[in-house]
């Protein structure tokens, strides 16, 4: 047990690699990075090579002059600033909302948003450099940020947050020209690296907060069909960008069913990769059954802690 | 009961303090964002919005900074504002002196706009009001100096309506005529072709956003001759046009 704790303390995932092999222990991470980079490339082959598959950016994109996709958050701000968009933008909103209702609200964060590449890198570097201290801001701060951006839109009568939003600044910047946006992105990176662990995406970003609201009702969720197999290696907590979402479902706290219903789980799947006991798997929010017989109370699991 | 209450009271105080701190921080940030957004609402003089753009105050609420207009402009004249540029980040504009609007008949930029920030009710490009040309410098305009440059007049897509050449006596020589370029706001689209083409080192005719270029009479002003024409056409035109032509005849 001690030896287990030591190895996993040095590098989470070592056990999983030993148990499943490197590839299987990085499957979802690999797919996720492919998705993030692939989506960015789809936007970039237009301006780079003149191959126009997707036009626009994450606020609104038009794929093959056929599929409109609109960011519902920016449209909400526009509505609060008292402008009703045309039909095409509204169709795009409907498609996007339905899509994220299916795949998980904050799947936007882990599978699409380009800033995630940056903040994940900052976190990776933070661990590598052994940087320990972290400022304290509570995680719900992001909902205050979200509220602030909505109030700002209503009061100024403009989509005020778009002036500073690092998410659209990065995506639009990479496609249409960065300008000084790199400074904003560097600030986010340094903040995450030196000031606060998972600082931007885990505590402050109102875009992520908005998508987490969709996440309350999403179909795809992480289920824990084998939670009784957990050997407390803590690797999933170490890799999860929102570790607080795991505990209730893993430890069956207050009879929580074996599925992560917390809306801030980003459906990144890293916990699946990193668990040597295959506790986690993708499922739906209705996966409330555990594979083997297990007392649903969960008291025996939680008690030793 | 007491024992349980004490830590929870302390925790509650801590929670309230944390919440207050957070609310203040986020509030200040919001104030900053709001002021920044307000500040950026006025369009800088050199930036012209694409055809059909809503008035600036509505535009910054309607445009979602997607760049579809930029992509569908066949002449590639539009840019999305970078953060360091003095207008709403990510909104589209063009700089006439660099590349003016070619006034495409089918107005692809407007068609591409998914939100209507570029107003879809604009069907005739000649009716667009991107800005207004102003002959800003009479001291450098070659026609004012007595030459027959006429370039702005000739390149204007709405020639003879948006720009006319009005003849005046060249008092300096006493024998020649000035052909003074005059812009008419009811026909000028603000495309900027005149500014682009003006051969002086710095353009002598420039396009500005409407709010900068256009004056407005007080609402109680009535122009006698217009009122007359409204009341009974024939009398009005007789009373108003004859003297003007007469005066011109004198000048030539
Ligand atoms: S929290 Fe914000 S910046 Fe981070 S991945 Fe999600 S949308 Fe992107
Ligand atoms: S619980 Fe798993 S899927 Fe959800 S955010 Fe954490 S690591 Fe990712
Ligand atoms: S009218 Fe044509 S040239 Fe002018 S901005 Fe639109 S697409 Fe570009
Ligand atoms: S297409 Fe419309 S919404 Fe998009 S950037 Fe242009 S004006 Fe704004
Ligand atoms: S901006 Fe110049 S060229 Fe364009 S319509 Fe007006 S006067 Fe003519």
Image: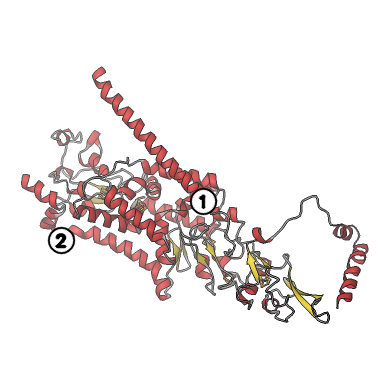
Farthest top residue? B2
Query: In the rendered view of the protein, which quadrant contains the N terminus of chain A?
Result: top left
Marks 2, 1 in one chain: no
Q: In front here: B48 or B180?
A: B180
Farthest front residue? B172
Which residue does the numbered mark 1 point to in the structure image?
Answer: B37
Using a 10 Å C-alpha cutoff, classify the residue at mark 2 as few (fewer than 14 neighbours), some (14 to 19) or many (20 or more).
some
Q: In the rendered view, does A246 fall on the left or right side of B249?
A: left
Dot 1 falls on a residue whose secondary structure is helix
Q: In front here: A262 or B232?
A: B232
Location of residue A121 in the rendering, given as x and y in whole percent from the top left corner: 27, 57
Query: In the rendered view of the protein, which quadrant contains the C terminus of chain A?
Result: top left
Is residue A264 visible to the viewer in this orientation of the structure? yes
Could you say which disc has been placed on residue A22 in the image? 2
Q: In the rendered view, does B209 fall on the left or right side of A249?
A: right
Location of residue A193 in the rendering, given as x and y in whole percent from the top left corner: 27, 52
Q: Is residue A122 above or below residue B194?
A: above
């Amino acid at each position: 047990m001690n030896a287990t704790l030591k190895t996993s303390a040095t590098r989470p995932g070592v056990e999983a690699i030993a148990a499943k092999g490197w590839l299987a222990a990085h499957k979802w991470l690999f797919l996720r990075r492919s998705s993030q980079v692939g989506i960015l490339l789809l936007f970039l082959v237009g301006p780079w090579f003149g191959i126009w598959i997707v036009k626009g950016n994450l606020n609104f994109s038009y794929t093959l002059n056929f599929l409109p996709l609109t960011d519902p958050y920016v449209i909400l701000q526009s509505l609060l600033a008292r402008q009703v968009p045309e039909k095409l933008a509204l169709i795009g909103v409907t498609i996007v909302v339905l899509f994220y209702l299916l795949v998980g609200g904050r799947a936007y964060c882990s599978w699409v948003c380009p800033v995630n590449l940056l903040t994940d890198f900052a976190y990776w570097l933070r661990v590598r450099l052994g940087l320990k201290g972290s400022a304290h801001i509570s995680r719900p701060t992001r909902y205050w940020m979200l509220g602030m951006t909505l109030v700002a839109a209503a009061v100024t009568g403009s989509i005020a947050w778009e002036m500073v939003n690092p998410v659209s600044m990065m995506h639009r910047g990479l496609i249409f020209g960065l300008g000084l946006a790199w400074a904003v992105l560097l600030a986010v990176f340094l903040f995450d690296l030196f000031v606060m662990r998972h600082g931007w995406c885990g505590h402050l970003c109102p875009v992520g907060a908005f998508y987490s609201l969709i996440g309350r009702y999403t179909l795809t969720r992480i289920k824990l069909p084998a939670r009784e197999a957990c050997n407390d290696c803590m690797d999933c907590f170490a890799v999860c960008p929102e570790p607080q979402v795991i505990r209730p479902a893993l430890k069956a706290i207050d009879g929580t069913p074996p599925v992560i219903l917390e809306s801030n789980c980003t459906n990144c799947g890293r916990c699946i990769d990193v668990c040597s006991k295959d506790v986690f798997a993708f499922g739906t929010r209705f996966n409330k059954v555990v594979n083997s017989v297990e007392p649903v109370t969960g008291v025996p699991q939680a008690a030793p802690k | 009961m007491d024992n349980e209450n004490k830590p929870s009271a302390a925790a509650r105080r801590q929670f309230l303090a944390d919440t207050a701190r957070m609310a203040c921080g986020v509030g200040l940030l919001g104030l900053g964002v709001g002021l920044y957004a307000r500040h950026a609402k006025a369009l800088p003089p050199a930036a012209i919005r694409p055809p059909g753009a809503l008035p600036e105050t509505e535009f910054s609420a309607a445009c979602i900074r997607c760049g579809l207009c930029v992509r569908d402009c066949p002449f590639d004249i539009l840019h999305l504002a970078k953060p360091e540029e003095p207008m709403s980040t990510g909104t589209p504009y063009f700089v006439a002196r660099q590349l003016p609007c070619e006034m495409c008949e089918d107005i692809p930029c407007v068609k591409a706009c998914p939100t209507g920030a570029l107003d879809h009710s604009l069907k005739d490009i000649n009716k667009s009001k991107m800005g207004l040309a102003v002959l800003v410098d009479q001291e450098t305009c070659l026609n004012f100096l007595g030459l027959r440059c006429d370039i702005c007049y000739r390149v204007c897509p709405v020639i003879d309506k948006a720009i006319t050449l009005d003849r005046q006596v060249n008092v300096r020589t006493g024998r020649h005529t000035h052909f003074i370029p005059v812009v008419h706001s009811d026909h000028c689209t603000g495309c900027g072709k005149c500014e682009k083409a003006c051969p002086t080192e710095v353009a002598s005719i420039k396009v500005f956003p409407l709010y900068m270029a256009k004056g407005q009479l007080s609402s109680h002003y009535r122009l006698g001759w217009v009122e007359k024409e409204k009341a009974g056409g024939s009398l009005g035109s007789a009373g108003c046009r004859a003297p003007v032509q007469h005066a011109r005849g004198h000048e030539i």
